[in-house]
Amino acid sequence: MRIQLKLLFLCSLAAVFATTLAAAPLRPTHAPHAIVASVHELSSRVGVEMMQSGGNAVDAAVATGFALAVVHPQAGNIGGGGFLLLRTATGETHFIDFREKAPAAATENMYLDAQGNVIPDLSVIGYKSIGVPGSVAGLVYAERKYGKLSLEKVIAPAIKLAREGFSLAYEDAEDLKDEDLSKFAGSRRIFQRDGHFYQTGEILKQPELARTLERIGKNPDDLYHGALARELAAAIQKGGGLVTIEDLAHYEVKEREPIRGSYRGYDIISAPPPSSGGIALVEILNILEGFDLAKLGNRSAAAIHLVSEAFRRAFYDRADFLGDPDFARIPVPQLIDKKYAAAWRDSIDPSHASVSKDLKRPPFNELERVAQLSPRTLHEPENTTHYSVVDPEGNAVAVTTTLNDSFGSRVTADGLGFLLNDEMDDFASKQGVPNAYGLIQGPANAIGPGKRPLSAMTPTIVLKDGKLFLVLGSPGGPTIITTVANVLMGVVDFGLDLQEAVNAPRFHHQWLPDQIRVEERLSPDTMNLLRSKGHKLDVRHYWGDGECIMIDPKTGDRLGASDGRNNGKAVGY
Ligand code: DON
């Protein structure tokens, strides 16, 4: 993804965009029984095979997750973390938090120099940026507790893909040329053939990863309590990282209560802290419920203005209040309260942009925090991946998982063949100074030993009349939240089919920097109208990757929408 952005300077925008559009489906994929939507056709197929051989949506999700660690090393992972939201056909919900944790030796100022300035890249590239990975613990937990098949069965396709290899698409071959990957010998050898870069259509084999996956399949606890844990901790420490064998032994998966809300009669079930996603999504929707967006029209300047003002306010609250709920008291009830949202709504001027630094929060019952914030320059990393599954019974799973940046810390665990995350950058390295995504964060998200960094990942399930309707999610750092909101509103407010809602030009506001980010496909007239309301625009090529599912209320068909901005594919039967 990052490489794709660089390519824009080399190729004409039009040519690149034509390629992107060519891949974009215009209608959802129909499947009468079951479906998986993920960023790679092979990982979607693996999930479908599990369901065809008697597995449920969780078996499919776990198999897809392990397969993504092979076919999508940019973000699919066993060295990172994520969230899995399950809604069973009987209506039970379970939210599995397998977010990375800060190692015990982490300290609040570990990324600051002697003058108190953030040391560039230290929290993003290399061993010091690595948090204690949770993905294997999370997938294994989900499989043991909610799956029907064995771990060996669901991990087998990933082992095969790693051992026998798979053909690289153009975008993947380009991504693998990542300059920062070259800085680490293991990554350079495995993903870049020591400088003889992979070309489109070549086969990437990962025998070390195959062996590691095989070991996990036989004894999954080994990565946290056994020989694999010792090897991993030794590899990280040799490079100067902080993760120890004790950190791995103390890693815990947590089941948490999902965030719940409602929007125009639909029920929303989404990610709780340590993700900000569910709270921000519900807050945004609560603010917008009082406006007749449908009347204003899909992607009209008037609607984009109001929605962006809601985004601005929710991200302001995110910055001040959110963090790891095991360490900070998060005022969840107030943030998702409809009356609080109504008070925020009253502060929106339909004709003029608010100014982020002048926002005045409505009366707030909980401890109010005031941030002293000043944005600085940002770099633009990318990658995380979302996938959605619905099985024949109607069990639904939404998983968003990440290494944080594309290829994470760029460090491949020596001898083990898998990439490690740079999730430590999701903490506030210094309060008031933006992280890699330009996000400003408050004291609740300061670095601390054993803490989980605040996330924006927003795996979400929407019900209509109490029945499963949408399974949603995307990568994109802070834009995850607004992408999920945009797709949801596309269906609910503007009557788009799911594929149209995924395809529609995206826009995003995150309070600071004080600007609306828009995809360049938005019409120039609309952009000018937004400017005339006082908005600064940050025009980008595209972002995100909505891999989503809708259930047709009339037929029960599973409709998969994969995002043409990427190479995803919904596969069903
Ligand atoms: O957890 C988070 O919010 C980030 N680590 C996600 C990063 C991401 O989505 C990058 N993707 N494009």
Image (spheres, grey):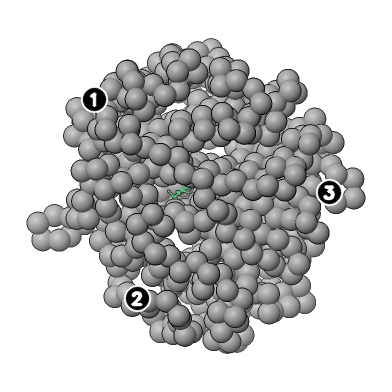
The numbered mark, 2 or 3, whose residue comes first in the sequence reads 2
Q: Label 1 belongs to which residue?
A: 234
**Label number found at residue 552:** 3
Q: Nearer the viewer, residue 422 or 516?
A: 422
Is 31 displayed left or right of 313 in the figure? right
Residue 472 pos. (x, y %): 65, 50
Whether residue 546 is visible, yes or no, is no
Residue extending furthest right?
Answer: 554
In 3D space, how far apart are the residues under numbered discs 2 and 3 (Cα atoms)?
44 Å
Residue 518 pos. (x, y %): 55, 63
Q: Label 2 belongs to which residue?
A: 369
The numbered mark, 1 or 2, whose residue comes first in the sequence reads 1
Q: Which element carries disc 2, helix, strand or loop?
A: loop
Name the residue rendered at 44%, 85% in the picture: 360
Q: Which element carries disc 1, helix, strand or loop?
A: helix
The numbered mark, 1 or 3, whose residue comes first in the sequence reads 1
Q: Nearer the viewer, residue 479 or 401?
A: 401
